[in-house]
Each structure stands twice: as structure tokens, then as C-alpha cells.
Image: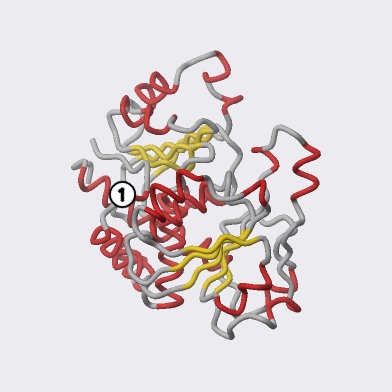
Amino acid sequence: MRSIIDILDLTTDEIESLIKEALSIIDDPKAYAHLCDGKVLATLFYEPSTRTRLSFESAMYGLGGQVISMASADSSSAAKGESVADTAKVVSCYADIIAMRHFKEGATQVAANNAAVPVINAGDGGHCHPTQALADLFTIYREKGSFNDLTIGLCGDLKFGRTVHSFIRALSRYSGVKFMLISPEELKLPSYVKKDVLQHNGIPYVQTTDLESVLPELDILYMTRVQKERFFNEEDYLRLKDNYILTPEKLKLAKPDMSIMHPLPRVNEISVAVDEDPRACYFKQVLNGKYIRMALILMLLKEAKAL
């Protein structure tokens, strides 16, 4: 049974196919409105979520399917000590496909190993978030028309940001990509991502603590929040949380066609005044995420012969 745990579980041809399907859904949503009639998606979320959980649920409803949901670990048998493996086996009896978020790295792989239906990783700890990477890729495609020859700035929490890690892995297979890694020293990109992805694939990158110095070079700026939930020490969080705040004044340094992205939720790192800038794409990302998840659900259910 095929599951999607890492963005690299999808080939570039499959990503291209998903993008084409998502564009087709946008063009003719009625043609897709009943393709999942009688099918059930289970959303198992052991961590809080707004966009990802509702995006999956909206995607399934848009295909005519139904949703059963576990919105928190406290409201499930996990609170009684049930293992992820057993939960996956049980939920497989009720659902045709599972979207799962967990606070522990590797938990979604455990679920996939034990489920009788496809499992989609909706975020596991600080590790991966493949469907956010798909939403990001779809957004770049719609804004730029290509994934090649782009200079991309990643700004904020690059250490714990699973969206950043999946984003880098997703773009590592395209040519002419260059990364500007902008973060405080304490939140630098993990060495294993630099070694296993950037250096392994010969992708050029620059590490800096200064956003303004690289802003004029960027085709895409991917902002992230400093994640309070990943810190053991609140003092460290408070010291680092407002290191980078994107404002209209700073954007005067940027290219007129630079795309501003953010996986959301936003805290302080993008001023609300930036929302009116035509370069702001982060709310477009949200909608793009729904359509690309619809395409992914269809692909996995077809492969599982559930459609």
C-alpha cells in the first residue's frame, strides 16, 4: 500500500502530473465533485492545525467524499496509551485514506507501516511536511511557470521548520536553484539537510543572518515563524521570535516580481501591511494547497484501487 511520507516519495513526473490535475480541478470543479462518493478520509492530528487539517477535509468534501476526524490526541485513545501502530490498524477499518500529523518524527511512517490504506504525512515533528511542499511547488508554478533557475530566500526558523526541510528537498531536483539561508545562528538549517540535500546535489547556498543584504537577489522569499512549540526554553523563544519582520519599507529593496511565501500561521514575521502588496502569495498558497491535496487524494485512491 503506497503512502506519502516524504516529498521525495513522489517523482518529478508525478509532481508534474499532480499539478496538471490540480489545474484541471480549478478549471472544472464540477467534473471532480463526485469522484470520491462513498469514500472516507480520516484526519488524525496529534498536534494543533488549522490550515492543513481543514485543507485536507475541504479537499475530500470537494471530491464528494466524507471525513472522520481526530482533532487532538487528548480526544483519542492515544490519551489512554494506544500506540500509533494500533491506531492506524483501527482507523484503516473505518477509512479509505488517512492524513496524519504527529509531534514525533517518524510516527507517520509507523502508521503507514501498519495501515491497510494509504497514509499521507501531514507533518511529523520537525522532519517533513510533504503536502505543504506540494502546495509550495504549485504556488511557484502558478507564479513563475517553472522551478528552474530561481534564487530562493528561506528566512526564520530553518532548524525546526519541517516546511523548510521539505521545501528544500522538493526543489533539490531542479536545475539552476540557489538558496539564501537567512536565520539567527541558533536556528540555522540542520547540518544533515545541508550535507544530504544541498551539498549532495551540488546546490549552491549562502548562509547569512542579514535579510536585507540578500533581498535584492531573491526571486522568492519564503518566510517562516519561530515556532514556540519546538523550544524547551521560553527565554530563547522570546529572544529570537522577532528577529525578522518583513515590512513594506524592506520590500523596497526587492525585485518587483519577487514572490513572498509563508506556510502560515503568521505571528509577527510579516507585517499585515504587506498583505496588500501584489507580491504577497501566502494566502494563494492556502488555496493552492487544497487543490493539490485533492489531486494527491485521487492519485493514491486510484493506485489503491479504491476508486
Q: Which residue is mark 1?
A: 36
Residue 41 in percent (x, y) is at 39, 40
* Amino acid type, mark 1: Cys
The residue lying furthest to the top in this view is 80
Residue 277 in percent (x, y) is at 65, 79
Comparing 255 with 10, the one in front is: 255
22 to 125, vertically: above or below: below
Location of residue 216 (image quadrant): bottom right
Considering the numbered disc 1 on the image, is that residue within a helix, a strand or a loop? loop
- Asked which colour scheme the image uses, the reply is secondary structure
206 to 278, vertically: above or below: above
- Count of numbered circles on the image: 1
229 to the left or right of 94: right
Residue 152 in percent (x, y) is at 50, 68
**Looking at the figure, which quarter contains the N terminus?**
top left
Comparing 270 with 160, the one in front is: 160
229 to 278, vertically: above or below: above
Residue 42 in percent (x, y) is at 42, 36
Tell me what residue is drawn at x 25 percent, y 39 percent: 2
Comparing 55 with 234, the one in front is: 234
Location of residue 201 (image quadrant): bottom left
72 to 141, vertically: above or below: above
Comparing 264 with 288, the one in front is: 264
- 10 Å neighbourhood of mark 1: few (<14), some, or many (≥20)? many
